[in-house]
Amino acid sequence: MRTSFFGGRTPCFAGGLAALVLSLGGGAATAADVQAANPVPRVVTRDGRHALFVDGAPFLILGAQVNNSSNYPDVLPEVWPTIKRIHANTVEVPVAWEQVEPKEGQFDFSFVDTLVEQARANKVRLVLLWFGTWKNTGPAYVPEWVKLDGKRFPKMITASGQPHYVLSPHSRTTLEADKRAFVKLMEHIKQIDPQNTIIMIQPENEVGSYGSVRDFSPAAQKLFNGPVPAALLKRMGKSPGSWKEVFGDDADEYFNAWSIAAYVEEIAKAGKAVKPLPMYMNAALASAFGRQPAATYASGGPVHHVIDVYKAAAPSIDIVAPDIYTRDHAAYTAYLGYYARADNALFVPETGNDTEFARYFFATIGKGAIGFSPFGMDDTGYYNYPLGAKDLDDAKLELFARNYTVFEPMMREWAALAFAGKVWGVSEPTDPKANHTQVMELGPYRATATFGQWQFGTDKPTGNPQPTGGAAIAELGPGDYLLTGFNTRVRFDGTQPGSGQMLRVEEGRFENGKWIFRRVWNGDQTDYGLNLVDRKQVLRIKFGSAQGAAIIPVGNPN
């Protein structure tokens, strides 16, 4: 048995984690759930924190989303090598309405069968993306029999009275047809997947409308002139009235958001009645700072300023999630803050696959996110530049792979600690005001991450040649912290009397729930802070102080 200063013998986290999971889950996470062979995945919330429970315990999605047209059996051989290369544990894959119901009332789920079988063979979980009434706001993935029958399946009408490209959320016929196909999919999943290879569902994709703030059809206009639903009034603390009377200049967008959210709620609720898998909706984002005209972004989608509308209209949707493609550090971290809420688990189901996006993994999981997933992760040769990379070479893949390989063996421990509210993380900033520095407040300690310094000495941080740095910290117990990351220096300072000094730093790894000691860091490796370089390093740090001792900073000042 290898030893360490953490309790003498190398600690095993397996038993402790199970106890932590049960205590954190409260009434929602019972012992029976943990012991059950195949508990259905679910999102659990307690004290404003969240966890995705898979197999009865918290699970961190180390995700990858394939390209939109990689959802056919013959293409899957071009998916799995990339998934293995980056060590993803979960793959997000579209299932299109046109694919499963090419003729009305006739269903074909053969691709789903193949996908699930191959996912199990490749030892990954799945998130299925239902491309139905809306995909990037449009109807591209509805069956031809829907596309060609505008009378049965009407489009939205613009304010000028012209047909818009978006299917109307006020069409009962369209809703019932989409719902029927989605329920059939859920019935098939229930039949073929008792193992819960599929852990979550995304009904629809980036809903909303570009170019028209809402539907102005007669049916929509009648509802718009009528009363605001009571559930939304209660949520927003408003008095009764018409949409314009209650919401003023925001009325059109709020009405569209309610209409779409209520539409998807019916679909999600019906699907959950078959198998209650967690369900989320993703957002094509509005500006992170200030308000732009609603017609210039996906009006009606779950952008950050209408999250409350979605919570009121769609209680069957567990999470609203941001698809973040901005490269700007300030905007990216702002979006994380908007969606990390006491009533909403943070999940980034899509982000860019270019070099600078990999570092945002650390800021994301540091906010307690249940998962992170770059888009376009396959070898089909398609690249969505400028949102993502111009090409997906080995150097880019390695930046995502190194993150995932660090967290792969300890993802459940991390997810449980996040659920306990004991994690922090930062990504290398590019905004000038940040001075290549990020700070994490840990309570008794302040951790300062700097980017672009030599490993020795007190030179000023200047930033890495490319912004690739990031760090994540978890509190394992009093005075006991885990630190990992890349291309950054981290300095700890006490913030209160008794915070104490750093007693020892161990480098090691997690293996089967156990901390495996490799070596002690000291001297040059600790005098100027803890330098996380371009290789995988996991550190465990112990702090302590003699009675009456002064606070001693860890590492010399910059």
Image (cartoon, helix red, strand yellow):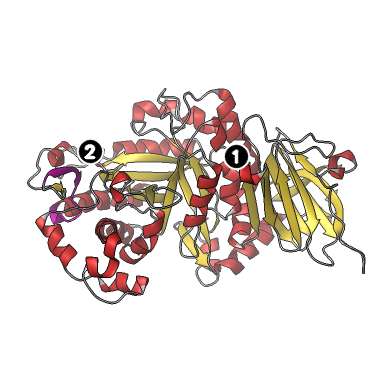
Q: Specify whether residue 111 is painted magenta.
A: no
Q: Position of residue 98 (x, y in %)?
A: 22, 38
Mark 2 or 1: the one toward you: 1
Question: Label 2 amino acid?
Answer: Glu
Q: In this view, does 186 lie to the left or right of 344?
A: left
Classed neighbour count for the residue bearing mark 2: other residues with Cα under 10 Å, few (<14), some (14–19), many (≥20): many
What stretch of residues is rendered in magenta? 162-173
Q: Do the residues labelled 2 and 1 touch (CB within 8 Å)?
A: no
Q: Is 243 in front, or is 142?
A: 243
Q: Where is residue 99 in the image (x, y as percent from the top left)?
A: 25, 37
Q: Is residue 38 left or right of residue 521?
A: left
Residue at screen point 15% across, 58% down: 220
Residue at screen point 17% across, 42% down: 106
Residue at screen point 39% across, 32% down: 67
Classed neighbour count for the residue bearing mark 1: other residues with Cα under 10 Å, few (<14), some (14–19), many (≥20): some
Distance Cα–Cα, label 2 vs label 1: 43 Å
Q: Quadrant of residue 546?
A: bottom right
Q: Position of residue 187 (x, y in %)?
A: 29, 52
Q: Mark 1 points at which residue?
A: 430
Question: Label 1 amino acid?
Answer: Thr
Q: Is 499 in front, or is 132?
A: 499
Give me the disc on residue 98: 2
In the image, farthest residue toward the bottom: 239
Work out whether residue 1 can be spotted. no
Residue at screen point 59% across, 48% down: 363
Earlier-in-chain disc, 2 versus 1 = 2
